Image (cartoon, grey):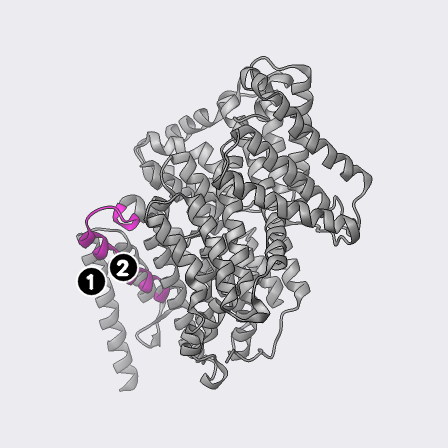
Amino acid sequence: MTAKVPEEKISAEAAEKALEIEYGGRQRRLSGWTAQLVYWLGASYVVFHLAVLNIHPIDPWVFRTFHICVGSVIGFAIYGARAADRMQIPWYDWVMMAASLAILAYIAINLDDLLFRAGVLPTMWDLVIGAAGTFMVLELTRRAAGAALPILAGTFILYAFVGPWMPGVLHHNGISADVFFSYIYSMQGIHGITTDVSATYIILFIAFACFLNASKAGDFFNDLSIALVGWARGGPAKVAVVSGVLFGTISGSAVGNVVASGMITIPMMRRVGYDRSTAAAIEATSSTGGQITPPIMGAGAFIMAEILGIPYTDIVVAAIIPTLLFYIACYVHCDLHARKNDLRGIPRDELPGILTVLRRGYLLLPIVLLITLLLMGYSIFRAGSVGIMAAVVASWLTGQATRMGPRAVLDTLAFSAREAVQLMAICACAGIIVGVIALTGIGGRFSNMVLAVAGESRLLALVFAMLIALILGMGMPTTAAYAVAASVVAPGLAQMGVSPLTAHLFIFYYAVISAITPPVALASFAAAGMANADPWKTSFIALKLGLATFIVPFMFFYGPELLFRGEWIDILGVMLSASFGVFLLACSTEGWFIGRRIGWPSRAVLFASALCLIVPGVATDLIGLGGAVLVYAYERLLARRLVA
């Protein structure tokens, strides 16, 4: 049995527009031989990557160039330059596609010479290839991800040339055009670490997520969420929270999560009495948390692993407790809101039975295999590839209608390529910024400036880092926001004694939650569009729901136990106290405690108590508990007086 269709529906057009909020794409609807060309090229593109990662490695520069150039061919075919350019590929895009292949051929043929002279003794052709390749990355990113990131990258390019005339910390000696473009279009810039991650981890896990969805694991997650909590008080909102956790396993995109689960949860929330803005905000906040949810976090987490030179599993483990705190806060907010407004759940006779849903538990096989192989020490590439094959096998157990045959596998491979092109462009464009930062030395000078302003206060330095990550994340994809902020801010934090993992996770978390941070809150705007709600009201409600995530990163700086560091007894104690802390934080912001509305004095005390409990330490825990007991006693006394 599956859940009945909600009375209010979300149109496919609304869902498509929600996705375009994040990627700004103007996707063409190709037909005929051009559609077939893109289809087969896309499928071959993903197969080639899987073969290189698992069977026969090739030179890294050639591999990354293939990733960008062939991905650009697909990108210029499916993304139009203008909104009206929807049905066919114009001549100038064919020129761009041919130029992309020419660049690939040039680098493959001249590889040995380029390794010797790139950024040092460039030739005229190096300048031409570098400039053309840089321009095409900027243009493809503009089409696939909007103008914000290309404008920022263009500003950095301009800075590379006008540096001699800039004052103070921005001054540098200047760079010639041939040196600049040969450097930027090398392993130090566009083909650097961000593209390395895109060509390996990101495309692998995009394919894994697509195959997992094709096996109907997404439907299973939705039905499981509905069966578990759909009947509870404010059940549909709690379904959104649970599905946010589950979908975080198969999607690293906040807006993608909004569309995938919001199609079901937003109408369900509206049906039981949630207003449009609150329903949209709950979905946006829960979906944003998917990017910090193990085992498959946002693309930035893979970049983090490469920058730090640590296993990806270390980042996954460190993210567990902060993720739990985030979703505990979301769940409690939903429960308190339902209590205040007397909102009910979905009648049980309209929900799928838990036992019926669990009969499809075999759809979890790919994820279980992935985690098991990672814990056994297998490479991420091997574990992810086995997970893809397991998803195909799992689909065979579902039934004839959803069984993945050869054609379905090809369809999923082709779709994976289309999904990968967006992040490929973002990572390549971020590589421009990272390259300029390294070439001009602005990163080190900016870090020194932060140190000078912050003085000896690491707290003030962390506040600067938070603001930079949030500002960069406004209108930019999380991956790019994290990559740029990490290049500029993380070295300064490290100089102040902040551990590298803590510094990078701190920046990553704020880059993620920028998706629900006004004034530009992409996830909130997407959910508001689907719910036909006020975007601004939705954004501020989402900000309230995600408040714990704005606080927790500061706390795991002061208490490494929140990142699973230390003895088990200490970690468990910190997790329990922090969980109670986010519960009190939700009570404070919702204005509801022990079954009744509370006034601002009690809310203020609860807020302070919550902070004390989230901060690791026996003394702070005792202060926090004391504050909570004080409010409890005070509110009980008021309640008795009202009854009397």
Q: Residues within 10 Å of mark 2 (few under 14, many from 20)?
A: many
The one of 255 and 556 positioned closer to us in this rendering: 255
Q: Are marks 1 and 2 in contact (CB under 8 Å)?
A: yes
Q: Amino acid at mark 1?
A: Gly
The one of 228 and 44 positioned closer to us in this rendering: 44
State the mark number for residue 626. 1
Q: Residue at x 46, y 32 (%)?
A: 488
User: How many discs mark residues in the rendered view?
Assistant: 2
Q: Which residue is mark 2?
A: 609
The local secondary structure at tag 2 comes to helix
Give the residues drawn in magenta, as a range: 559-587
Q: Earlier in the sequence, mark 1 or mark 2?
A: 2
In the drawing, does residue 106 fall left or right of residue 337?
A: right
Displayed quadrant of residue 16: bottom right
The local secondary structure at tag 1 comes to helix
Q: Is residue 364 above or below residue 596?
A: above
Relative image position of residue 456 (x, y in whole percent): 30, 32
Gap between marks 1 and 2, in whole Å?
8 Å
In the drawing, does residue 195 fall left or right of residue 74?
A: left
In the drawing, does residue 535 fall left or right of residue 586?
A: right
Relative image position of residue 489 (x, y in whole percent): 43, 34
Q: Amino acid at mark 2?
A: Ser
Displayed quadrant of residue 502: top left
